[in-house]
Image (tube, helix red, strand yellow):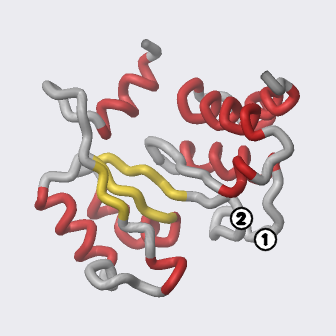
Amino acid sequence: MEIGRSLRLARILRPGTGRTVIIAIDHGNYAGAMKGIENPRGAVEAAVRGGADAVIVNIGTLRKVYRDLAGRVGIILRLDGGHTLLHPDKTPSSTLTTTVAEAATKAGGAGVAFGRNVWQSNNPIGMVKALVRIVHEGKSAPEASLQLRDTR
């Protein structure tokens, strides 16, 4: 296994079991802050103190709490690929999705989670392949986007 991938996986998989407990703290964007995560810093602290291996946060929360997370828990950055602080364009596109995924990994995210930008793509299989190349192989967005031509 490539060194970078091993290092990223080690941030979210518990040694000894190879399993993980991931706590999502990314729900506030959709319907306002949910009970229990009104205070992102407090929610992160609760997840860490409870023994979580990783947390899922959006870029806004990460910017507020990254100092609290650094070295204490794995970080999975949630980017829906549409309107985000990383890329304020509201129109989802394949280029935007791969660019946001690349920015997330460069920002220190151990992974990304996408939904509608995969399913609304002209090539969902190619989009998944492109995201895998960015996250797991360290490819750039333009390099990974070559997968969008492959429909297998």
Residue 40: horizontal and vertical position, in percent?
33, 76
Q: Is residue 6 above or below residue 38?
A: above
Which quadrant is home to the C terminus?
A: top right
Q: Give the residue displayed 41% in from the left and 84% down from the top.
A: 33
The disc, 1 or 2, on the residue closer to the chain's N-terminal end is 2
Residue identified by numbered label 2: 82
The vertical placement of 34 against 128, above or below, is below
Residue 152 versus residue 59 in the image, above or below: above
Q: In this view, does 37 lie to the left or right of 51?
A: right
Q: Please state, as top left, top right, bottom left or bottom right, where the N terminus lies in the image.
A: top left
Tag on residue 69? none
| Residue at 63% in and 49% down | 103
Whether pointer 1 and pointer 2 mark residues with C-beta atoms closer than 8 Å, the reply is yes
Left or right? Give the position of 86 relative to 46.
Answer: right
Q: What element carries label 1?
A: loop
Amino acid on which the number 1 mark rests in the picture: Lys
Indicate the position of residue 96 as horizontal and vertical percent values.
77, 53
Identify the disc placed on residue 90.
1
Please name the amino acid that badge 2 sits on: Gly
Q: At x 60% / y 52%, what residue is drawn?
A: 114
Residue 120 in view? yes
Q: Residue at x 24, y 34 (%)?
A: 19
